Image (cartoon, rainbow, N blue to C red):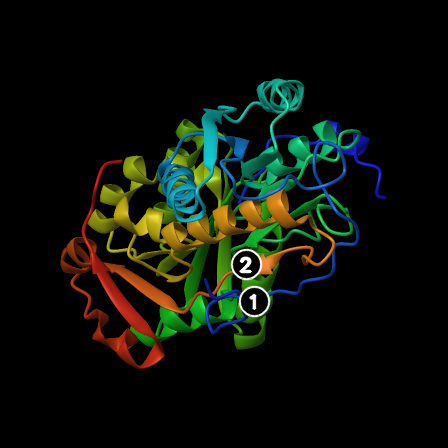
Amino acid sequence: MKKLNKVLSLTAAAALTLSLTACSGGTQGNAQTPAGNSGTPAAAGDGATYKVAVIKQMDHASLDEIANAITARLDEIAAENGVTIEYEVTSGQGDQSVLRQLSDQAIADGVDAIIPIATLAAQVAAVSAEESKTPVVFAAISDPAAADLTGIDYVTGTSDALDTSKIMDMIFAQDPDASKIGLLYSLSEANSTTPIADAKAYLDEKGISYVEATANTNDEVIAAASSLIAAGVDAIFTPTDNIIMSAELAIYEDLIAAGIPHYTGADSFVRNGAYATCGVNYTDLGAQTADLAYEAMTSGMSDMEDFYQVAGGIITVNTETAQGLGLDYSVFDAMGTVVPVTTTED
């Protein structure tokens, strides 16, 4: 079993067809032994009661959507199987110490599973559950291996890994003459590390220049976006970065005014004003995570994978932003299923 105490030195970080698809990618491995508070799963049916702790890394549209989908699906599972599933949804507000308190309290309360949403929440929950072996079923981890969340016998979950090349292809399908791309992300987000490296490799291969701007707070995101506007970039790419997502509503109007489309790693960005993404549906991901949690609680984890790549392939476009930018998003029709949305402030 992997030792996890080193996770506590990390700074704050981010995030039913379980398969590889055009807009998502990754690998998966095998978990090895049953899980549960006592090392064995509880018996399903016959009015059994299960307790689940849903712990969000922070509050923002993507993580809220996932949490709502998880709890809705847990309610459905309870009704379908004649059981009771009690759950509590909490938020660590992006604070590692708060996340540890929430995870430790869940273990002390004897929950049957913890469902952490986003990378740091999952890393902290895995540490808390190391002794009890309470199943930890994470949601929306872009790179579980890089986050040291694989090869642990009581940990599994869902991954929303990006196909960064696909999003880069969208940028150049929309603007074949784009010559300078902005990369907007947080250095404290584990979810951003691999996609940003992939984006740089893609652009280097094409001989396209790029400008990086990083931020760790809302005010820094606003300043970073302003710096990219001043640099004259033709488009901006952000992965599934929780820090940037939290500030999307504060920057999207300035980007539209500057004529710069913002391509992102999740549809929640787009509903908050970004231009477009190609990735997973977080409502579907939440429901799939709840299914995995119920399986872990009732059947154990001996036959479960290290993680499950959630199917993507959905291109989401904000039609109001497209209008503001004067862009014709029909160029994406040949690249996947296009879902139009409008801006919502949630």
Depth order, front residue of 202/92? 92
- Asked whether residue 300 is in view, the answer is yes
- Along the line of sight, the residue nearer the viewer: 134 or 19: 134
**In this orientation, which residue lies closer to the viewer: 220 or 36?**
36
Instruction: Estimate the x, y position of residue 174 in percent, counting from the top left.
Output: 30, 72
Q: Quadrant of the C terminus?
A: top left
Secondary structure of the residue carrying tag 2 is loop
The number of numbered discs placed on residues in the rendered structure image is 2
Does 244 appear above or below 146? above
Labelled pair 2, 1 in contact (Cβ < 8 Å): yes
Q: Amino acid at mark 2?
A: Ala
Question: Which residue is denoted by mark 2 in the rendering?
Answer: 161
What is the quadrant of residue 317 in the picture? bottom left
Residue 25 placed where, x, y %?
A: 56, 67
Q: Position of residue 253 (x, y in %)?
A: 22, 43
Q: Residue at x 17, y 58 (%)?
A: 319
Q: Residues within 10 Å of mark 1 (few under 14, many from 20)?
A: many
Q: Does residue 116 lie above or below 90 as drawn?
A: below
For label 2, the crowd category at 10 Å Cα-Cα, with few meaning under 14, some 14 to 19 and many 20 or more, is many
In percent of the image, x 44 and y 31: which residue is there? 220
- Residue at screen point 38% across, 36% down: 64
Q: Residue at x 52, y 43 (%)?
A: 45
Which mark identifies residue 327? Answer: none
Whichever of callouts 2 and 1 sits on the residue coming sooner in the sequence is: 1
Q: Which residue is mark 1?
A: 25
Residue type at mark 1?
A: Gly
Q: Position of residue 189 (x, y in %)?
A: 57, 41
The vertical placement of 307 against 174, above or below, is above
